[in-house]
Amino acid sequence: MKSYLAQLSEEAGPPPPYTRGSWPDTHHTQTSSCPHCGTNLSGSRPGDSRDAHVAIPSVLSEADPDCSPAKLNRLKELICAATKNEARRTKPRPRTMRPELAEEEATAQESPVSETLTRVARKMQGGIYRGGETSVDALVKSRYRGRDKYSVPGRLEGVLEAVGAILYAQEWTGNSSQEALDTTPAANQIPRSSRLGLELASEYVYEAMLLVDYGCPSRPIRSMWNCRDYFLNVDLPEFDNFSRFLTTTARRWEQGQIPDSATWDHIAHRMEAVEYRWPPVVDVWNAATLLYYYNTRRKPVSAEDRKNGLTGYTGVLQEMVDEVPTRGTDRLGRKLSLDVHVLIPKFVSKREDREQMMAKAKALAEQHGIPLEVPEPRRGLFERVAGLFLCRKKGLKEKQGLKREG
């Protein structure tokens, strides 16, 4: 079976010759134009066209675009399709914040999961319609057109998943119309960011978020080959800017401002960094959701607090617990499952913190009747070596005992 990229390449015909500058530098990219609609933002002054450009347009009406069931289902398929590895790990509960299509189709139409996912698909299709495309397939095809597999900086469909994840998180909590659109330059221009810097920062930020959610002491930024100041002054701000930019991109999508090709490429390439390592530890939907929570659940912190490991993140776990009486346990259950199976084992460095988090997650699951299978604690290198030695010693003793009996 041919890949999606191969099918699009055949339909689009032979690609034009590549010229330098046909896509952005994947390491340090800046633009003076809006990455969503191309409006020139350079040289603007207070009160000029820049301020008019960033004003929030009227909210899209769901009756305006062609939101046929077939197009909505196609959007749900692209943003919610589980990978083969994830499909094998859905018991007793999915280890992802993303709703599964099979579950959404099996639930009643009035269920919160189904209603939220349908609203997200309608908003995304409305944005596609107002952005000049007729369907999500036409939009993705336009981003692949004239490209071969070597010129694509990442999996371009991942941008759809990232936008869908953020809009789903907004719609689930009802914050879509309450959160103000960020109009700062950092949120509206393609941010400078290196892939390695984002990967290092994501590892640190994911742990910091878990420490806050589970009430553990913060971890001061450690010196890494005398690069502590660089990490504090460059990598973390770049991570902050990217999370802000990604959130704003999703918000602008529902206003009909679809990312242009340069922005699309940048997000696709950088999302592979915040997924962390290859194969990905955190998939696109979960990574985008974590970046959204990190960007929207924060308060300002001083430079000294920043050095001591405080990111300003205020937490989201208690928010999920508080919504159980009115919204059910779906979001809380998914978060606990993702934490105990992926985030805590992979990103929490201290064993004491891991044990405390696992115990609290298990207690929350039991309190709210959520089926949660807590994995065995991760052992360090010394413990694994010692375990192998003890197993070998035990085996030798059993072998000697059998010989004596014989």
Image (cartoon, rainbow, N blue to C red):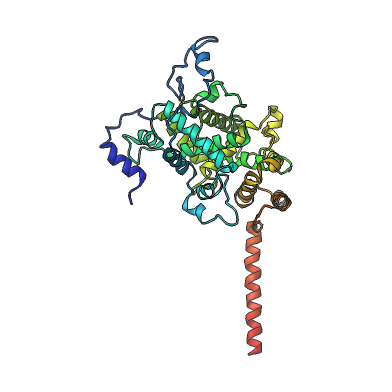
| Quadrant of residue 91 within the rendered picture | bottom right
Q: Where is 45 relative to 261, above or below? A: above
Q: How many labels does the image show?
A: 0
From this viewpoint, which residue is outermost toward the bottom?
406
Query: Looking at this view, is 189 or 336 the one in front?
Result: 336
Rendered location of residue 334, percent (x, y): 61, 47
From this viewpoint, which residue is outermost toward the left?
14
Answer yes or no: is residue 154 visible.
Answer: no
| Quadrant of residue 56 within the rendered picture | top right
Rendered location of residue 1, percent (x, y): 33, 52
At 44% across and 18% down in the image, what residue appears?
39
Q: Where is 58 relative to 113, above or below? A: above
Query: Looking at this view, is 267 or 199 the one in front?
Result: 267
Q: Where is 118 relative to 40, above or below? A: below
Relative horizontal placement of residue 354, taking residue 227 as reference (left or right): right
Rendered location of residue 5, percent (x, y): 35, 42
Answer yes or no: is residue 193 visible.
Answer: yes
Location of the C terminus by quadrant is bottom right
Rendered location of residue 193, percent (x, y): 51, 31
At 63% across and 76% down in the image, what residue appears?
395
Q: Where is 174 relative to 4, above or below? A: above
Query: Looking at this view, is 402 or 7 the one in front?
Result: 7
Query: Looking at this view, is 105 or 346 the one in front?
Result: 105
